Amino acid sequence: MIGRKRIWKPVGFVDYSSLLLSVVNNVERRLMSTCRAVVVPRFGGPEVLEVRQNVGIPDLGASEVLVRTFAVGINPLDCRMRSGYGRSLFEPLLPLILGRDISGEVAAVGSSVRQLHVGQEVFGALHPTAIRGTYSDYAILSEEELAPKPPSLTHVEASAIPFAALTAWRALKSTARINSGQSLLVIGGGGAVGLSAIQLSVVAGCRVASTCGKVSIDRVMAAGAEQAVDYTSQDLKAELKGQFDAVLDTIGVPETEALGIGLLKRGGHYMTLQGEAVSLTDKYGLLAGGAAAAVVLSKKQVQYRQSHGVNYSWTIMRTDSEALEEIARLSKVGKLKIPVGKTFPMTEAAEAHRVRESKVLRGKVVLQIE
């Protein structure tokens, strides 16, 4: 028994430190069962947004992570969902919590989560069809929807990046499969997805041209574009000399579609963010609308393959853990940046939406969670 000290505990001894820790853990679990959240009780303008207390937090699944929210980027999708976009899916689920982007701290993890731990700073984005969003004190995401936040970024800066960058990544890497030496045209390069696409393409070794508003030309050029043309130009096609291997159209109106298709090389890829799947399902219901969307997409693909020899697709953001890790790496070294125009507290979410929809602000609008 030399060198070993035996600790005797009298009968009836109570380990108060363990008891206190147990009580604290139980209190924390109770406190984290509800939180504040910005909800949409009905579809409409920014005024419908409500900040509610004591909104329930669902139990974590095995592969899920509970994130204490510090900042949330506001995306065009958030505003469209608030107005009723996707009502065929979301209307039965009202009141709805909006939000896709997030930056925060891991508060709890599911039983099968291995790469993330409590207290770690993370950022990421939910899939467009996720039911419970991120405009809340605590949000739930799957492990593959999160990555460690680059330490060089603030939470506000980090929250502006994931959804837009993953959307651009989906188009460029998964659909067009861009390679070094190729050329890309970004229609609407001044927004978050457009800027992400420009920067990702430059890193991949591509030459990039872009259309944008006059006020965004300097920003687009700073992102790495070789050419930036004011979209109000009388002859865009003439100014955008040459043909391109891929076109990413973030605007998606008939005029920009005709421009993009007309500037593609044979075998090139035209990708639009404004596919008709959601609008058709909202109009005809999930089943009939989904079938109608498949028909519309197929007709477009056949039409442009026969008339121009090019590929046509609708781009939808997908969660991709490997892509998010690369996006984090590029953000860390300063090769992927999304400028933030203004921040608002969560209690002013309605005003944040008004500012976002006014389109007078340059840069992303972000909610900071107090």
Image (cartoon, rainbow, N blue to C red):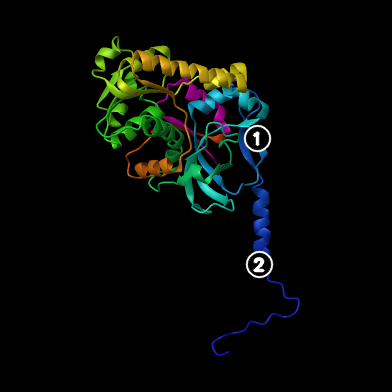
Residue 46 visible to the viewer: no
Residue at position x 57%, y 32% in the image: 98
Q: Position of residue 61 (x, y in %)?
A: 61, 46
Which portion, as a residue range, is magenta? 347-370
Q: How far apart, in angstroms, are the residues tagged by discs 1 and 2?
A: 35 Å
Q: Is residue 93 magenta?
A: no
Residue at position x 42%, y 21% in the image: 360
Q: Position of residue 62 (x, y in %)?
A: 60, 49
Is disc 2 surrounded by few (<14), some (14 to 19) or many (20+) residues within 10 Å? Answer: few
> Which is more N-terminal, label 2 or label 1?
2
The disc placed on residue 52 is: 1
SS at mark 1? strand
Instruction: Name the residue tied to disc 2.
Output: 18
Which of 19 and 59 lies nearest the eye of the viewer?
59
Q: Is residue 39 left or right of residue 335?
A: right
The disc placed on residue 254 is: none
Residue at position x 56%, y 20% in the image: 291
Q: Is residue 349 magenta?
A: yes
Is the residue 217 above or below the residue 181 in the image? Answer: above
Q: Position of residue 136 (x, y in %)?
A: 58, 38
Is the residue 112 above or below the residue 85 in the image? Answer: below
Which of 111 and 337 lies nearest the eye of the viewer?
111
Is the residue 254 above or below the residue 369 in the image? Answer: above
SS at mark 2? helix
Residue 110 visible to the viewer: yes
Image-quadrant location for residue 247 = top left
Most extreme residue toward the top is 234
Give the residue type that dot 1 points to: Arg
Give the residue type that dot 2 points to: Ser
Most extreme residue toward the right is 12
